[in-house]
Image (tube, rainbow, N blue to C red):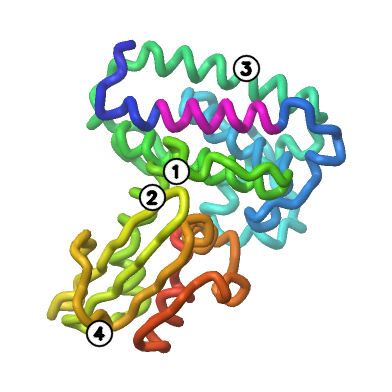
């Protein structure tokens, strides 16, 4: 394979997750495709449609020419409208049509990855005409597909892969967002620290330190006398950070110590996915 070593972990994570998704939906009856998922307003069919759409755009396929209905009240932003297009265009597809398109897309993407020889810094097209590096594009994509695998597992009652390659990519993506959550959105006091203690299939202890200028940085060194500490399991961390559950609904799974106003503000702004 000619894939750059920097990109290989993201290709491996995508492969693991997409194969899991294919296995999950392969033999679903029609009614199961309409089950609600934790992804707001989306069914199993919608999530799989979204995954197909993401990968078709990674392949460089043209986006569908389609007009969204006016009664999609969960669609309120340009980003949501962009993402909804690939979903709504498949809303009336049958189960065989969905699995066939998914399988064909996986074949094409595997071929693309086998032949990928571009440098990780190569600029590629992103959502809404944005531009980003190939490395960041593949990283985000591996994260997205793993999160949607978890959406499907929750909807279908088939838990698993919380410690898969995609889970470790998700950990790094979500940790990158923590300083902004704590220092900017939650407005943690300057010269303070907030500790996150996560246990379960993926475990980590991280500290967000806020300096005198109000900038947050992520550290692996535990803080002495932090302003707040949040302890929770990995699955709850993911569901909160991806907006799959509200802080109120997950309250009994998060142990909070320190400043209650600060912990409440952090949890209120914890969701970082669009």
Judged from the image, the secondary structure of the residue bearing numbered disc 2 is: helix
What's the magenta region? 12-24
Q: CA distance from mark 3 to mark 1?
A: 25 Å
Marks 3 and 1 close (CB-CB < 8 Å): no
Which of the two labelled residues, at mark 2 and mark 4, occupies the earlier sequence position?
A: 2
Marks 1 and 2 close (CB-CB < 8 Å): yes
Q: Which label belongs to residue 104?
A: 3
Residue shown at 62% from the left, 32% from the top: 21
Position in image of residue 233 (x %, y %): 48, 61
Q: Residues within 10 Å of mark 2 (few under 14, many from 20)?
A: some
Judged from the image, the secondary structure of the residue bearing numbered disc 1 is: helix
Which of the two labelled residues, at mark 3 and mark 2, occupies the earlier sequence position?
A: 3
Position in image of residue 274 (x %, y %): 50, 57
- Label 3 or label 2, whichever lies nearer to me, is 2
Is residue 131 within the magenta segment? no
Position in image of residue 211 (x %, y %): 15, 76
- Label 2 or label 4, whichever lies nearer to me, is 2
Q: CA distance from mark 3 to mark 4?
A: 52 Å
Q: Is residue 260 above or below residue 107?
A: below
- Judging by the rendered image, the residue that carries numbered circle 4 is 189
Q: CA distance from mark 2 to mark 4?
A: 25 Å
Determine the image quadrant of residue 131: top left
Which of the two labelled residues, at mark 3 and mark 4, occupies the earlier sequence position?
A: 3
Examine the rendering and report whether any part of residue 274 can be seen: no
- Label 1 or label 4, whichever lies nearer to me, is 1
Examine the rendering and report whether any part of residue 134 can be seen: yes
Judged from the image, the secondary structure of the residue bearing numbered disc 4 is: loop
Residue shown at 46% from the left, 42% from the top: 163
- Label 3 or label 1, whichever lies nearer to me, is 1
Please tell me which residue lies in front, 147 or 156. Answer: 156
Which of the two labelled residues, at mark 3 and mark 1, occupies the earlier sequence position?
A: 3
């Amino acid at each position: 394979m000619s894939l750059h070593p920097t990109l290989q972990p993201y290709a491996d994570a995508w492969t693991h997750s997409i194969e899991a998704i294919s296995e999950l939906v392969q033999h679903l009856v029609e009614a199961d495709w309409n089950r609600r998922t934790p992804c707001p307003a989306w069914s199993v069919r919608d999530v799989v449609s979204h995954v197909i759409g993401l990968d078709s755009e990674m392949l460089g396929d043209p986006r569908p020419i389609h007009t969204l209905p006016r009664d999609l009240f969960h669609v309120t932003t340009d980003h949501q409208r962009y993402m909804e297009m690939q979903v709504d265009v498949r809303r009336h597809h049958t189960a065989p049509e969905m699995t066939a398109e998914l399988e064909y897309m996986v074949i094409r993407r595997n071929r693309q990855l086998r032949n990928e020889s571009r440098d990780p810094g190569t600029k590629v097209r992103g959502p809404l005409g944005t531009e980003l590096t190939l490395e960041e594009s593949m990283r985000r994509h591996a994260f997205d597909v793993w999160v949607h695998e978890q959406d499907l597992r929750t909807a279908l009652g088939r838990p698993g892969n919380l410690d898969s390659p995609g889970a470790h990519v998700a950990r790094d993506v979500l940790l990158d967002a923590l300083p902004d959550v704590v220092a900017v959105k939650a407005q943690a006091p300057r010269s303070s620290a907030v500790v996150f203690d996560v246990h379960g299939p993926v475990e980590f202890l991280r500290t967000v330190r806020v300096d005198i200028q109000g900038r947050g940085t992520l550290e692996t060194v535990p803080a002495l006398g932090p302003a707040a500490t949040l302890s929770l399991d990995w699955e709850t961390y993911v569901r909160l950070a991806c907006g799959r559950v509200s802080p109120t609904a997950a309250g009994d799974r998060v142990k909070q110590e320190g400043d209650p106003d600060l912990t409440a503000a952090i949890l209120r702004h914890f969701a970082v996915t669009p």
